[in-house]
Image (cartoon, coloured by chain):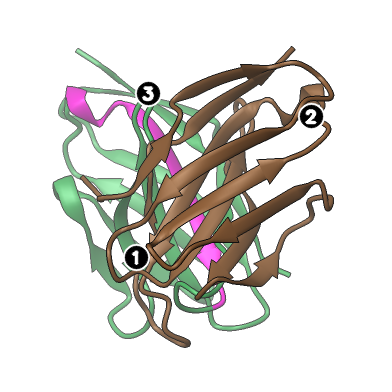
Amino acid sequence: AQSVTQLGSHVSVSEGALVLLRCNYSSSVPPYLFWYVQYPNQGLQLLLKYTTGATLVKGINGFEAEFKKSETSFHLTKPSAHMSDAAEYFCAVSRGGSNYKLTFGKGTLLTVNP
Amino acid sequence: ETGVTQSPTHLIKTRGQQVTLRCSSQSGHNTVSWYQQALGQGPQFIFQYYREEENGRGNFPPRFSGLQFPNYSSELNVNALELDDSALYLCASSLGSIGATDTQYFGPGTRLTVL
């Protein structure tokens, strides 16, 4: 079975500050890892994904995440927060490609203060 | 813009009724997955269809059923609605070749309220 734990249901940062959203996973097989963003009253948009290869993954809107197998982590970062980054962020894990289900964490709500 | 559309946007039903939610996938996407997102929670996998056949199911009762059609559209049907079925229902489409590393693209969702 696979699972995802997102540490902190709510993170608040100032505009221009570092964004760090934490995700730890559990998987019995090499995981595929994802970060999705959800704006109010909208569906999920893929920010980035790790499948194989380079462990530092760059995504859209300046976000990146690093896969650390020894720590079973896949934390999401952005050097400088923008007001438009305020949204809910979900970390997800799967066993492989899109024929496998995504298992999501409970989400982290990011607030950006002016 | 993912090209995945869902209808209706919002729906209100009463307990015991039946509901059908619809999803239109991107052209060429053979796989559609459905997820339930309760308020304040992450999405939970309901089931997946690949080339019109069920290809996996989450921990949901049989009153949740689905169909996938050759024209890249699909349906989620829920019978005997319960109050706990109130949620945002998301569909996600993908190319879906076995072993592929492609991405699941999500639609905007249907907000179902059961009274």
Residue for badge 1:
A49
Q: In the shown orientation, is residue B27 left or right of residue B71?
A: left
Q: Say if residue B107 shows up in the picture.
A: yes
Amino acid on which the number 2 mark rests in the picture: Leu
Chain under numbered label 2? B
Residue for badge 2:
B81
Crowding around mark 2 (Cα neighbors within 10 Å: few <14, some 14 to 19, many 20+) is many
Amino acid on which the number 1 mark rests in the picture: Lys
Chain under numbered label 1? A
Quarter of the image that includes the C terminus of chain B: top right
Asked if the magenta segment contains residue A91, the reply would be: yes
Q: Where residue A40 is drawn, which disc sits there?
A: 3
Q: Do tags 1 and 2 sit on the same chain?
A: no
In front: B44, or B64? B64
Instruction: Look at chain B in the picture and name its colour.
Output: brown
Point out the tag, 1 or 3, that comes first from the N-terminus.
3
Q: Is residue B63 above or below residue A94?
A: above
Element class at badge 3:
loop
Q: Main secondary structure of the magenta part?
A: strand
**Highlighted range, magenta:** A83-95
Element class at badge 2:
loop
